[in-house]
Amino acid sequence: MTDHHDPVSDAVSAVATADAARERRNFLKRGAAGLAAAAAAATTARAADPIGGDFPEWSTKIGTPLRGYGQPSRFEAPVQRYVQKAFGDLAPGTGGARAPIERLEGVITPNGLHFDRSHNGAPDIDPAKHQLLIHGLVKKPLSFSIADLLRYPMVSRMHFIECSGNSGLNLAPQPPQLPAGVMHGLVSCADWTGIPLALLLDEAGVEPAGKWLLAEGADSAAMSRSIPLGKCYDDAIVALYQNGERLRPEQGYPVRLLLPGWEGNMNVKWLRRLKVTAGPTHTKDETSRYTDPQPDGRARQFTFEMGAKSVILRPSSTMSMQGAGLYEISGIAWSGGGRIARVEISTDSGATWKDAVLQGQAMPKSLVRFRLPWEWNGQATALQSRATDEKGNTQPSRAAFRAEFAPDIRFHNNSIVSWAVNADGSVKNVYL
Ligand SMILES: Nc1nc2c(c(=O)[nH]1)N[C@H]1C(S)=C(S)[C@@H](COP(=O)(O)O)O[C@H]1N2
Ligand SMILES: [Mo]
């Protein structure tokens, strides 16, 4: 049998590159004893090889040629966004493609899987021709090309975007039995890079009468929203990059507005115009949608900040448990109010709660990963998670949320999600 992994010949053939030469120096430094040990280790590894010393096919030939843009393994092809066209192929760009959050880990949403909520599809914008206009109540109206914008100082920050229609499906009379991403995947998180909006507004010089901003997209839906100037000066970003690369078309290429922690809809994509105004414009997009009917018949408008929220992803609805024993409960939490301070988990249908571990640094208005080991005794129970942010905002129970609004409430559902774990191991969506 050919020895594919002879450490000596490997080291010798590696001399060709500078990197490998350094490796070889280190290798030779280990001396004869080191060589013997390495050979022994290789023998042991081979003896322990579960396929009896024959290497799998992929270990015996040249791999995939080098390529300009990497793609996930073909075995990960089933990991896709959940595409929901609101009007089918009559309006193929209208609706949402939800992130398969239950199949992801950590807190960063890969760019190809970032949820996409679009009112009339992603326009194919030529960055060499696109302009961003700042006008209205300003001393000096300004028009920026993308090349102009790329010369400004930038900031990078991790933030989630959540559509206020997220979890709307969980307001249905009966709990839908769907993967978590279909119900709660209108949320994603990325490392966004762009220009603080305050910088561009200062350059245009806002008039004292200017109190609001109208932001408009260059898509054929001309999506537009009114934003109080305070937010624009606080932490708003004119974003050009998403996780290190330029924005994806679905996320607003070549430039979008990012309003950290505020409802997804206000994060205007394909940004073409910012008009400083004295008051809100009451555009179609902020009157026909995103308002919340109350029991007294009146509706709340302009619910900007997204509530504290969490969802357990492993295990979650439509998954199945592989028998009693030790599991890790893992999920994501976020809040438009700032940092997540705490995520509590109940493994007994809400009777008792335990603090989960928040992984890494909880960043403001970003997803945070939580984890908790759980010994499942094999009996039927329900899992719940409850997030609280640094301001003390916490997730309401489903009943409390329902009581606060009229029965036809569709948006801003941040109520506690419950997964039943049945004795047969099946995990179901339930209302508790
Ligand atoms: N111009 C424009 N901006 C838009 C939209 C749109 O259809 N057109 N959709 C909005 C909605 S409803 C949401 S939830 C977010 C979604 O951002 P994403 O698609 O990058 O996830 O973008 C917002 N910005
Ligand atoms: Mo949205």
Image (cartoon, rainbow, N blue to C red):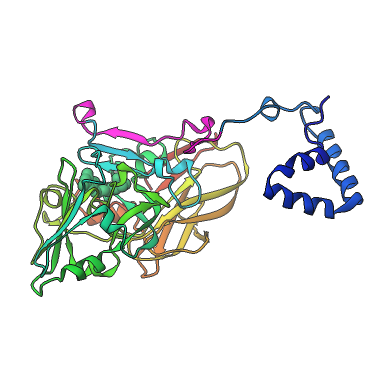
In percent of width and height, residue 162 lies at 32, 51
Q: Quadrant of residue 8?
A: top right
Name the residue nearer the viewer: 127 or 389.
Answer: 127
Asked whether, in this view, residue 185 is left or right of residue 197, the answer is right
Q: Residue furthest bottom?
A: 208
Asked whether, in this view, residue 408 is left or right of residue 69, the answer is left
Name the residue nearer the viewer: 89 or 203.
Answer: 203
Vertical placement of residue 52 versus 209, above or below: above
Please give the name of the residue rendered at 12% of the width and 67% of the height, measured from the top-left corner: 140
In percent of width and height, residue 250 lies at 30, 42
In percent of width and height, residue 399 lies at 31, 52
Count of all numbered marks drawn on residues in the image:
0
Residue range (magenta): 66-91
Please give the name of the residue rendered at 68% of the width and 49% of the height, measured from the top-left corner: 18
Magenta stretch: dominant secondary structure: loop
Asked whether, in this view, residue 202 is left or right of residue 189, the answer is left
Please give the name of the residue rendered at 39% of the width and 35% of the height, measured from the top-left corner: 177
Q: Quadrant of the N terminus?
A: top right
In percent of width and height, residue 212 lies at 14, 65
Asked if residue 410 shows in the view, the reply is: no
Q: Is residue 72 magenta?
A: yes
Vertical placement of residue 424 versus 186, above or below: above
Please give the name of the residue rendered at 39% of the width and 61% of the height, measured from the top-left corner: 157
